[in-house]
């Protein structure tokens, strides 16, 4: 079986390295970071932290140098979904591509480019330590299922799940994985937006009564949209918030990390997507709208030039 | 006429220096900044920027060294209203105290301590240049009127307005000044909260479609609360937003300045007050609630200590 990881960063590397251990799987990776790609090809891809693996992976910055694959696993940040699949769609003329990205909206884009799509939701997390080395910071399951209107077959979904399970990444194949996706989406919308706007670690944000009330408002809107879309959540996102508080009290949500580093965030695939789908099904989402506007304004502030001032919006006075 | 300025900072100094020019007015000032107080007593209080005035003012850090006054003008930040009037109430046993502070809720506190209260709303702005020197950055009117249930008489309101007008501070005495107060409150709630959360200057925020839509949502909630309270606005706060965009495109709203300097903000007297009064009169204010929660969370982030990290939430990575 030949699999291509599209975007072999912190998340993609977890999948690439685990799968690279299997004798019956040939792992390729498409990534634009030349130093990372070179290190992977020279020394193998190494995982540290919760994992201790070094596995062979064929990494390329040029997708024309990658052979056709049966499966793709796309793990880019959501704002790069289109450019990444545009560059690699040729590899999957008879393949299925699975998104393990945040939020919703990625599978819709994949479906424009490849014949069969798999919807995925994941809990594992990591960060790049140095080129060729990624630390696995969290474990957890991966849920995958066919994505209509261009669904992969259940047989394909089960084959991918089987490979992941054998590699040590726990994966559950489902007929309808949207419940898992929306449970995590709603959790993420509450946790990430609050972290990014208040700059509080997840657990501290949960313990601030006003902030927690706002999180719950964001969750309530998300649940109402899911219900209107006919999606049954896997579990209550409120419980995930509490679970995260328990397990990762001082964890800065990824969107907070993005904001502190002045990187574009994934707001469009999270609160922005809930608000957009809410409009489509007639469910008002004022709080998700507000968070989206605030994060977009914040992103805009990094580009504003104030006449006569070099960096008027440096965050420290 | 003896007047005591309570809190002789950027705003209080504008009133103190203007009034200090009048022969029939003796100006006292209570302020806790010893260097500022000493400079004022030694060299007079000086205004630069839009004004060019140096006037005699009797400044004290110890309120027991100030004689009884007919009028007080309180100009502290709103979170210090109670401590400031507690320290100085004795001076006004037969006096009237006028608030020229932001937001609503200050007059209610004054009414617990002094026999007669004047509600004020102002447009002038300034900043402290050095001890004893304040730059006047904006002119504009001051609107004052009796504050029930402990109203000053209209005769008193007119006397204070007359002194201010003669001093060069344009002042309008009104039977009911709440319309002016709420117009500015609603404008401030939209402009300040957006600036502080997105870190955009006022005009840039107004030109960002998503952010402006959120501002308009905050304004709409404020108007609904004002209407439920029987208050007729002076003008449309939306027009004030546009006027501010025109006149001060790159102005960082004061709450943004507070956030960048990690100073406690006046959110409780602005969006927090709209939300609280909204609850009292049964008008839902989800957007003002959300902004209040986010700013309070942000304030909290400056106090959070992350184990093992010296300053995990330094705003620059």
Image (cartoon, coloured by chain):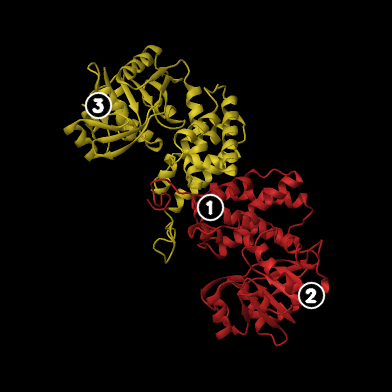
Chain colours: A yellow, B red
Give the mark toward the camera: 1 or 3.
Answer: 1
Please identify the quadrant where the C terminus of chain A is shown: bottom left
Residue at the disc numbered 1: B299
Residue B46 in sight here? no
Give the mark toward the camera: 1 or 2.
Answer: 1
Q: Secondary structure at mark 1?
A: helix
Which numbered circle lies on residue A28? 3
Give the mark toward the camera: 2 or 3.
Answer: 2
Q: Secondary structure at mark 3?
A: strand
Mark 2 and mark 1 in contact (Cβ < 8 Å)?
no
* Cα–Cα span, label 1 and label 3: 47 Å
Please identify the quadrant where the N terminus of chain A is shown: top left
- Label 3 crowd bin: few (<14), some (14–19), many (20+), radius 10 Å: many
In the orientation shown, which residue stands out farthest toward the bottom? B23
Relative vertical location of residue B83 with respect to residue B163 in this rendering, above or below = above
Residue A2 in sight here? yes
Which numbered circle lies on residue A261? none
Q: Is residue B108 left or right of residue B271?
A: right
Q: Chain of mark 3?
A: A
């Amino acid at each position: 079986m030949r699999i291509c990881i599209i975007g072999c960063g912190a998340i993609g590397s977890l999948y690439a390295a685990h799968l690279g251990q299997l004798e019956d799987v040939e792992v390729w990776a498409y990534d634009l970071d030349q130093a990372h790609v070179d290190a992977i090809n020279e020394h193998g891809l190494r995982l540290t932290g919760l994992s201790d693996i070094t596995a062979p992976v064929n990494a390329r910055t040029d997708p024309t140098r990658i052979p056709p694959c049966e499966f793709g696993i796309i793990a880019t940040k959501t704002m790069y979904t289109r450019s990444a699949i545009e560059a690699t769609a040729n590899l999957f003329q008879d393949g299925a591509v699975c998104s393990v990205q945040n939020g919703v909206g990625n599978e819709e884009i994949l479906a424009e480019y490849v014949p069969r799509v798999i919807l995925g939701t994941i809990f594992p997390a990591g960060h790049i330590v140095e080129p060729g080395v990624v630390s696995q910071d969290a474990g957890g399951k991966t849920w995958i299922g066919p994505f209509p209107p261009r669904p992969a077959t259940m047989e394909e979904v089960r084959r991918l799940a089987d490979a992941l399970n054998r590699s040590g990444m726990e994966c559950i194949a489902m007929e309808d994985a949207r419940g898992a996706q929306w449970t995590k989406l709603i959790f993420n919308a509450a946790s990430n937006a609050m972290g990014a706007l208040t700059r509080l670690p997840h657990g501290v944000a949960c313990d601030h009564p006003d902030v927690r009330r706002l999180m719950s408002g964001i969750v309530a809107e998300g649940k109402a949209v899911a219900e209107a879309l006919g999606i049954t959540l896997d579990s209550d996102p409120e419980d995930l918030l509490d679970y995260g508080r328990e397990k990762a009290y001082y964890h800065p949500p990824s969107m907070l990390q993005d904001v502190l580093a002045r990187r574009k965030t994934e707001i469009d695939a999270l609160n922005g997507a809930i608000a957009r789908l809410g409009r489509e099904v007639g469910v008002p989402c004022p709080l998700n709208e507000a968070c989206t506007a605030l994060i977009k304004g914040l992103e805009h502030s990094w580009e504003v030039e104030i006449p006569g001032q070099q960096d008027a919006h440096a965050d420290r006075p």
